[in-house]
Every structure is written in C-alpha cells, then in structure tokens.
Image: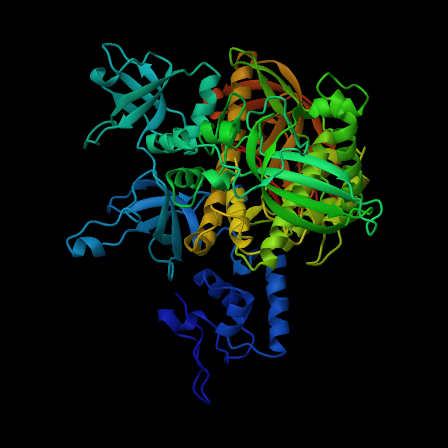
Amino acid sequence: MAHPPRKPRAGKPSPDKSDGAAADARPAFRRGDMPDKETILRFISENPDRASKRDVAKAFGIKGDTRAELKDVLRQLEEEGLIERDKKMLRRPGTLPAVAVLEITLRNSDGDLVARPAEWLEDHGAAPVVVVRQSNAGRDRGKSRTPSTAASIGDRVLARIFPAQHGKGPSYTARIMKILDRRDGLILGVFRSTPGGGGRLMPIERRGEELVVDRDFTGDAKDGDLVEAEPARLGRMGLPRAKVHAVLGSVEGEKAISMIAIHAHGIPHVFPAEVIEAAENARPAPLQGREDWRHIPLITIDPHDAKDHDDAVFAEDDSSPDNPGGVIVTVAIADVSWYVRPGSNLDREALKRGNSAYFPDRVVPMLPERISNDLCSLREGEDRPALALRMVFSAEGRKVGHRFHRVMMKSAAKLSYQQAQAAIDGNPDDKSGPLLEPVLKPLWKAYAVLKRERDRRQPLDLDMPERKILLTPEGKVDKVIMPERLDAHRLIEEFMIQSNVAAAETLEKRKQPLIYRVHDQPSLAKQEVLREFLGTLGLSLARGASVRANSFNGILSKAVDQPYQDMVNEMVLRSQSQAIYSPENLGHFGLNLMKYAHFTSPIRRYADLIVHRALVGSLGLGEGGITPSEEAALENIAAEISVTERRAMAAERDTVDRLVAHHLAGRIGEAFDGRISGVTKSGLFVSLPQFGADGFIPVSTLGLDYYHYDEAHQALTGAKTGLGYRLGDGVEVKLVEVVPLAGSMRFEMLSEGQKMPTGTRSFHKSGRAKRGGPKKPGTRPPRGRR
C-alpha cells in the first residue's frame, strides 16, 4: 500500500519511492506542489481506505491556497468519470471500496477461497475476482481458526479489501472481518432421470455446473422435479456428484419459481429451531411502564391482503391558541424492540435476514410469524405494545414539535387503502362509515396540511408506476396490474416520512449514534451523461455539485404528455444514486431531507429495529434499548442490511421475470406491443408493459444495415439508412425464444426503424454496434433504484 511521498533532499528533487514503487513511474515534484492527475489517481487506487480529499492533501503536503486547486482537480476527475465518491471517500469507478461484502464462490488450485463482490454495477463490467486470505496463525499454534473468520464456499462475508500492488497477482485480496451468512451447503437444481436409474442435476443458474446423482441417492425425485441436493466429495475424474436432500415440487409449477430466486440469492428462508422456540415462548408485553393509549381510536390502513400491521394513525385539530389551524398527528409503531432483544437468537436471525422479502406467492419474513403476525402486529381490537409519536404541525404544514411515548394501544379498525379512500370519496361501507367523521376526515385534513410543506419541499417526483403480478389459486400467472395510486397511499406515506424525520432529529439531539437512511445526490459523471442526453431533446439540466431534487422535477414536468416522457423518467431514474443505510448522515436527496432514518417498519426491516432501540435507550423508555456493542457495530450493521435489502430486491425482480417468462413460454411466435427500455452496443432491451418484463433483441437480427450505438441519444442508428431505434420508442416485437428458468426472453423486431433526429450520427462517446450471432437472452439493461 502506497505511503505519502517523502520530502526530497535539498537541491535534488527525486521521485517518490514509497512502498517499493518503481522510481520512474511517477514524475518528480516537491512536497506541497500539486501532483498531476495520474499521480492522484494512482494514490486513490492504492489507498482505498484513506482516500478522502483530506487524505490526498495530507499525503502530498498540500496546504493553503493549493487546497483550492486540489479541489478543482478532484472535481475535474469526477466530471470526467475517472473517480467517484463513496460517502467522503474517493475511489476509481469499477473498483472495490476498502470494506465490502463478498460471496465466496469456489476454491482455486492453491487452496485459497475465491470470492466476488455481493453487489456490482453492470456498467462497471465484469465483477473482479478477490482471493480471500485466511490466517494460519491459529493452526501455527496448534489451534483451529475461530468460527468468526473460518469461511467456506457459499458463505457471505464482510471483508477488508487490498488492491494488487504493481499489477502482480490477483486484482484484490481480502481479509475476512465477519461472516454474515453461512450457507447450508445445499444447492438447487432440476432433476433429470437417466436410463437405468439415477440421473443428472441440471443447474438453475447459467454459470452453474451439471452434477451426477447416483441411483441410490435420488430419494423421491422424479424427472422434472426441483430439488435441493447436497454436493458430494469431488473425485479426480468425471462430473461432480450430488445427493438429493429434498424435493420441492415440479419445476413446471409457478410456485417453484420464487424458491429458485430464494436459493439463487442466498436468502435464509427456514428459521432455525432455536429461533422458532424463542418466538413461541414469547409472552404479551405488560402494561406496566407504558402509557395507556387504548382509548385513542388509532386505525391501520394497509393493503387488503396484509398480514402484519406495523403502523396505526390518528389525527386531530390542535386546540392550542398559539397554533391556529394547526393539527396533531399521532403515529404508533409496533414495539418490536420489546420482543427482539440485542444478541438474542431472534435478533441474530433478524440481522442475518436484514428484511422481509416479498414474492407474488409467498413472503420470507424477517421474524417468525408468532412475532410478526401475532404479538407485534397491531391487530384490530387487541392490546398491543407500541412506540408512539405525537407531532404538532402549523397550518402551513411546518412541524412545531414532537414527542415519543412507549404505550399500550388497541387498534380501532383495520382498513384497506381502497376502503378508506372510498369512504372519503362518498362510498363508505359498514365498517368505514362510523369512522368517517371522527377518524377519517381528520386524517385527510391533516394530510392536506402536511402536503403544503411537501409541495414546498419538492421531493423527487418520478412517475414510475409499479406493477403487481396476480396469481390464480393454482399459482399460475393470472394478470399483471398497475395498482391505482390513491390519496390514502400518499397520506400514510407522508405520515411515515415525517415520523422517520422526527426519529432522526430526536436521536441527533440526544447525540445518540443511529443508522440513517441516506440517498446521496447523483454523481457529477452521471449528471453529465443525463445532461448530454437531455440536450438531444432540447431540455437542459443546471450544472454544478449543488443540484437539487426540484432541478429534476422541472425536467420531468416539461416531459409530461410528450412522446419522450417515459424515456426521460427512465434516464432521470438511472442517474440517481442508490439509497443505502449508513451511520453517517448524508441526507436524503430524493426526499429533499437533511435528516432521515427508517423507524416505521420494524417488523420487516432491521434498520427500523435499531432506531427503535436507540430511541428506547436514549429517551429512557425502559427495557430493550441499544447496547454499547451495537453502537460500536453500526457501520458493519449498516453495510450488512444495505446488502440484504438489495439481495431481496434482486430476488423479487428475478422471480417476476421468471414468472412472466414461464407464463409466455407457450406463446412463441406471437407478436406483442413493447417499449424500448435499454440500448446497448449489443442490441435492444424491450419491455412488455402488459407483463412488466424485459426481453432482448440482438443487433445482428435488426436487419441488413450496420448499426452505430450513440450513448448520448441512447440510440442504435443504421449507417446507410439513418433509420434506428431509441430508448422509449414504442415497437412491435415477436417472441422467438424463452428460457423460463433464467427468466429471459428473446424478441425479433417487427417495427421499422425511425428517422433519427439530427445529431444522432455524431458519434461522441459512442461506438459501433458489433455484428455477430444472436446473443443469448438474459442480460439486463441497467436499472436505477431510488
């Protein structure tokens, strides 16, 4: 690892020779002078754990006015896409940070474990290989390695990353800090029987390998069954072997699809016996030590099929003469911290899962049903412990004050979003009718007050409707719908946002460490890509590092009802950074908030449970508060749950893709209306709006023309005809290939290309689309997440 340049001797400047680097590899300069860009980039690459702006200045002895020059150079490097920011640290795009979550995939010929990063952006190219060094210190003393650092294939680990020095050896080596998730050693595959007994285990992942199943180890598996199998010890010759452990059902059934994603992404889905036992032994929380709020008519408003209820709400006018027209909003959140104590079996399993994962046919919960659907769920008419919050707002929607309480409550009613909205719209039913005047109308009045401040705040307002797959009772795809977005949804969302802000403010005021939900502003490099794209449509985005959410809202509003509306929404989404959890407050760009922490869903998110414990401990509200060891581990916990959140999102998305592919497998040759959702040198990605899934069209099948890829315009343009295809174009396609287990489809283009606008054949930052054989379906266009 490189060290700061040494100060040369007087009268004889010499190049830096730190850490054995080649002397002629760097230009000569005096300490305190501004190094060139190449030297700065080398330092950032070789020092991923100490490469903030302050670190760079310190390493090269930069002081005084030269610091402003350094700031300009770093800004230029960021705009050029040569570096990017990771919190306060600088790093090269496509490189690993100093600490990362890895998935161990195999063991190399030297016996070392080999891993890949658990999270890797597709536009950074192939994920780097990391060789995991496991200490031999314990064995040298005649002892085995401790369980905390002795990893094996399939494990997910948190590791410190060390880049290769001077281009020798693997790209990275790593030292394990903590094992996050141990795999049980079972793999998933499709059993195919062979003549004479026995069979083969076919992989469900494209990079998987085929295994032999001997006739004595097939269990009850039949041809076409999806099975869990235990890999056998590898021999020197032939295919590796496996033993069937459990049969999960026919792979032709849609209900097997989500199980494939659960296995493929390593989501723990079976609770250990000791966790189930702890949940079953839990008893209802006592009233002692809590305020009795059972008389307050708090109600839950959730999806009609919700089984667990995290939050309940109530609102009323503020009677204080000092706050005319003001309102009081009360939010009660399930008190999970009472039941799930730090370091317990329930706690360890919850952290391992990080969050609940939701699939069309099942939920993989973070907590056992005894906790999530019973003791903690705010059921109608039943006493339940809660951590409650009263917030006072002025008539303009500005918060006047708030206070947290630990209470015992009783939900007055369980309503669905549609039920509550219908009552407000003049169509109450037997259940919502009696609640209309005393409960529902005050809630909507309070929402109208809070909306005034929201409109002034102007959070990012992307129009990206979510799709929901509905299944038949047999588990087959029935239809894909886009649920209507109601004011009832917006009301609950705004109340929850304000509660999350209040939690962060209270903990900061108490100087209590916590985990924030942070969303950094788009990098300058991504802003520049978006700016260039918008320029092709006659739209502009202000320059500078101080861009705000409302800058994007102005663009989105100009695109409304224009042919390119979907295209602009998609590109603005792709330009955004990814929201993560962090003990360091970076603010939430998308919501345009300075302080934000997840507090409102502790049944399904571990981050919220941490915030609950922090509030209980810092406010002296009784048992179940945060512990010093938890506070010390917040950085690691934030990294872990950021990964588990993305893991669940990827598994959910893969399940939808596989379900749709399975559903359309019998419709080869049919034509569909679609929209171009991604453009690459290799071809086009086309989404089918009616199904919510993507397919691929290889550029080699587009026609006889030679196509150029124009990144700025997100287009493929024919060199001879000038006709082409752009992101967002509506097209007609024919389905020609489906791979259900991979969740991939390949299309053939039926629509003629359109004449490209002037400038799309100016190939700045563009490339030639390569010709060749049809590309196998399955690769995805990049997708952003707010």
| On screen, residue 654 above or below 660 | below
Q: Nearer the viewer, residue 669 or 612?
A: 612
The answer to whether any part of residue 68 appears in the image is yes
Which image quadrant is residue 586 in? bottom right
Q: Quadrant of the C terminus?
A: top right
Horizontal relation, residue 563 to residue 629: left or right: right
Q: Position of residue 532 (x, y in %)?
A: 71, 48
Q: Residue furthest bottom?
A: 11
Horizontal relation, residue 445 to residue 612: left or right: right
Taking the spot 76% from the left edge, 41% from the top edge, the residue there is 556
Q: Position of residue 199 (x, y in %)?
A: 28, 16
Taking the spot 63% from the left edge, 72% from the top edge, the residue there is 69
Q: Quadrant of the N terminus?
A: bottom left
Q: Position of residue 684 (x, y in %)?
A: 61, 31
| On screen, residue 762 above or below 436 | below
Taking the spot 74% from the left edge, 17% from the top edge, the residue there is 429
Q: How is the image coloured?
A: rainbow
Which image quadrant is residue 687 in? top right
Q: Position of residue 592 (x, y in %)?
A: 70, 49
Taking the spot 36% from the left edge, 23% from the top edge, the residue there is 189
Which image quadrant is residue 785 in? top right
Q: Residue furthest left?
A: 142
Q: Nearer the viewer, residue 243 or 304?
A: 304
Q: Nearer the viewer, residue 167 or 101?
A: 101
Q: Residue furthest front?
A: 288
The answer to whether any part of residue 776 appears in the image is no
Q: Nearer the viewer, residue 326 or 418?
A: 326
